[in-house]
Image (cartoon, rainbow, N blue to C red):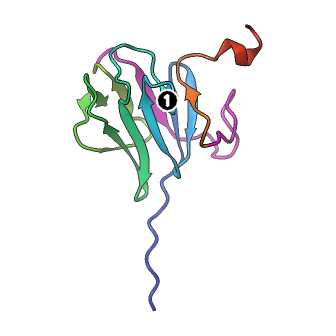
Amino acid sequence: MGERPVAPAAPGLVLLVDGVTTRMDPGRVYRVGRDPTSDIVLVDARASWHHAVLRAAGGQWTLADEDSTNGTYADGVRVRLPRVVGPGTVVRFGHPEDGPRAVLSSPPGGAAPLQGESCHVPQGRRRRAHRPRPDLLGLD
């Protein structure tokens, strides 16, 4: 029997929101919103509880709006259908000009974690995109 062609894996991607970097694994789906259990938590009233989703498929990353109230914008254009995104894409949540801003980039060197970031974030743990928690820094 013939072998099925395998879709190429999407490249690694880094998301920077409010000074917090997240190295994105193509094997995971990343939920963005105000919900504290989101993978990327936004702290802005214009962002919806479940605002957007980033996922890799078919060798590329896509951004989809989750029927947010105020919209998701990639490079200034409102995302109405899933849109291909990659390094250099600037995403705004809730407002095209001054909503929370996310910048996508390629991982540096592809091997070492970014400064202040662990290599592996278990599926059950969520990262906050607005500021470190004082209790985790021993400041409480």
Q: Is residue 108 magenta?
A: yes
Q: Which residue is mark 1?
A: 40
Q: Is residue 36 magenta?
A: no
Residue 50: percent from left, percent from top: 37, 30
Q: Which residues are magenta?
A: 97-122
Out of 108 and 135, give the one closest to the viewer.
135
Toward the bottom, the furthest residue is: 1
Out of 7 and 46, give the one closest to the viewer.
46
Q: Amino acid at mark 1?
A: Ile
In the depicted structure, whether residue 91 falls above or below residue 3: above
Residue 61: percent from left, percent from top: 41, 47
Quadrant showing the N terminus:
bottom left
Out of 2 and 124, give the one closest to the viewer.
124
Residue at (58, 32) in percent of width and height: 126
Q: Is residue 45 left or right of residue 120?
A: left
Residue at (43, 27) in percent of width and height: 102
Toward the top, the furthest residue is: 140
Q: Is residue 20 left or right of residue 4?
A: right
Residue 115: percent from left, percent from top: 69, 28
Residue at (51, 19) in percent of width and height: 18
Q: State the predominant SS element of the stretch in magenta.
A: loop
Quadrant showing the C terminus:
top right
